[in-house]
Amino acid sequence: MGSPSAARKIRDHRFVGLRWKGTVLLLVCTIVITAVITAAVVAAGFYYIYFDRTNLPDIGPFARFEFPAIGRVYDNSDQLFIEMAREYRQNIRYEDIPPIVRDAIIATEDKNFFSHSGVDYSIIPRVLGKVRIGTLVSRLTSPRRQDEVPRPAIFPHGGSTITQQLVRGHFLKDMTAQENSNQLRHGGFLPRALSYAIGPRSVNMLVRKLEEIRLSLWVEREMQARFASKHRAKEEILARYASLIYMGNSQYGFAVAAEYYFGRALATFTVDDADKAALLAGIAKSPRTYAPTARETERVLIRRNETLGLMAKNGFISRDKLREAEQNPVQVVSQRRNKMPQAPAVVENVFEALKEHPAGLSPEDLRHGRIHVYSTVDARLQQIVNEALEHGIELYEERHPRAKGLVQGSVVVLRNRDAGILAETGGRQLYEGRSASHSDYNRVTKSLRQNGSAMKPIVYLAAFRQGTFDLDTMVPDQPISVSDGQQQTGKWISNYDGQFKGMIPLRRALAESRNAVAIWITKQIGIDSVLRMSRNLGVRTPLKPYVSTALGASEVNLLELANAYRTMASGILAQPYVIRRVVRDSGEVVADNEIRESPVYLTDGALSLIQEGLRGVVRIPGGTAHALNSGRFPIAVMGKTGTTNEFRDALFIGSTYGTEGITVAVRIGFDDNRSLGRKETGGRVALPVFREIMLRAYREKRFGPVPEFPAQMEQRISAYLGGDPVVQ
């Protein structure tokens, strides 16, 4: 028998031989499997790319250049007022891209762009050389379950032509966003088999890449057919790329990026701006990394100079220009996009108007930049209104510190002659720590609240229209009760001061806002007369058919109330509107707004009587707006305060005279309808906002001279006051 050591050597030798044979066998199997998988993938991919034309997307919007852009709202002077967008983008034509910028893009992204047909086959060997072979072999020799920690992707990024990048950004956004998932996103036998072999993430990337190549070849053919030549099709594709590509900081496309980063229009770039063109072209690879900021410039500088080197290598710039451009520092401007006043209520009103537009438009058309809106709004007046509301609320909060940040307000300004909305704010700019946005609640149009004594002028106008009352009619200010609806017991009406003055002239009852008189008049003329008058003045919200509606018990929105006062000031019946004109991004005018004016039918001088009565609210001592009859307020106005039950809302609505004047309506209160506090009346809370708006609007000449009330009207009020001169 041999020795034990010799036997062990023989066994070890056989084991080593078997292990070596096993390794070789495994390697051979791996190679075979890899070859089979590769052949299957190549065959399937080849067929899919070059022969499968099923499930193609609609190329229409792409060919028509309907990329989401910036929707713009212009003010009444045709100046840019508001910008909005899903993606901040400006679509630009090939001719609008300066040659130096085109050269930078081509040199950086796709030097063979004008010669290939969507895919640059010359770079395939370089791309294949970047495949992670080690990761592939490791995956094939020791596959893991899908729920384990994912390995690095097998296939590299990069190598995409400009057309492929465009296809990926326009047609394959969802597929690209999901490809890094460790879940397989595609069905079918081959993707599932591949997923087991190389992992779901790599399969997702591979399928997306195949689709990208297929669509790129298809897009190039379709564009060439539409534009009649390959070169023209290439120009159109480059223009779409320069408009679509993400450039960091929520900016899309080279045009907005040039303005955002350099404060320059892209069209102004020349060969002397090679450094800026190279910087913009370098962003596309990785906006998060290469978008310039005031603090991070080193990586941006390196990337920019690499792009300049490629431009020189391809003959787009000279070596001297290269050295000169490389010496320029990276300088970006202060990036403040929107210096325009906040106007979320205006935007909301524009959106609502678009929904009802006869041309079938929608807010999405504006958000995507397919249309631009020319509005009635005065941008500077909007700023004045915003600031005046904030100042008024601050005054209230100084008296009530616990309400800080909680009280709300709304303001609307109408042009008397046609009800055009000149300014509108549906809430304070910062509420409960959140800045206003166009999706905020618009309290001008959406909030239905009681209007308090602001309803009384409609009652008085209804009485004047019947012809049995005038401003000098003596009316009883004495205890009176009312019953509403199903109530069996009456409610006694009191005045704000808790007193009754007996028989007084109607003009004083209006000026002092005597509740008892308003109820007495309503009983004399009937509530139906009041409701009809409200409709004649443009109020569309149904009012309750109860006598207490005379004191503002019914709810109405502020815009309708403002329009009623505007109608009384001008005698012109019109519905408020905010859109003057809508223009498509192509320049086509969709529609011009036609305002049809028609005088309100008021007999026996009823309109003149209510105008004089509301002017008396300001001029007569004891009038609820007498604070405006001051040398510090040299503007002749008419108007009325409103205070609702338990001081829940404070209002003031007033106008300058006639068709050349304006009407301003202010409402302040809590959204939860709590009380503002005792003595927080319309005259104390809302009137200061009105005063500031009127003073600043006319001082800054947003309109013509302040319209004067008729001399005879002013003289009659002066005569009532005992011959006192008109205070101006």
Image (cartoon, grey):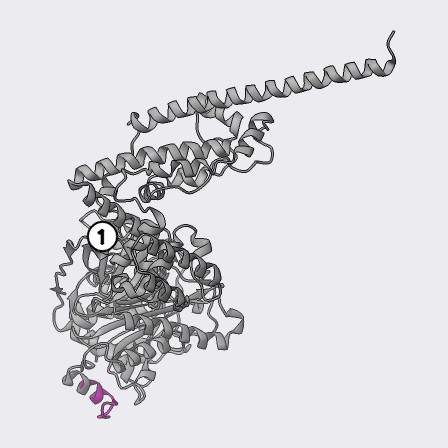
Q: Quadrant of residue 233?
A: top left
| Residue at the (35%, 75%) spot, across then down | 478
Which residues, given as a range, are shown in magenta? 716-728
Residue 484 shows up from this direction: no
Position in image of residue 497 (x %, y %): 41, 78
Residues 196 and 400: in front is 196
Q: For mark 1, does the 10 Å Cα neighbourhood hold few (<14), some (14 to 19), or many (20 or more) residues?
A: some
Residues 276 and 587: in front is 276
Q: Secondary structure at mark 1?
A: helix
Q: Quadrant of residue 453?
A: bottom left
Above or below 647: residue 63: above
User: What predominant SS class does the magenta segment belong to?
Assistant: loop
Above or below 16: residue 103: below
Outermost residue to the top = 1
Position in image of residue 235 (x %, y %): 22, 47
Position in image of residue 561 (x %, y %): 28, 65
Give the left or right position of residue 688, taking residue 233 as reference: right
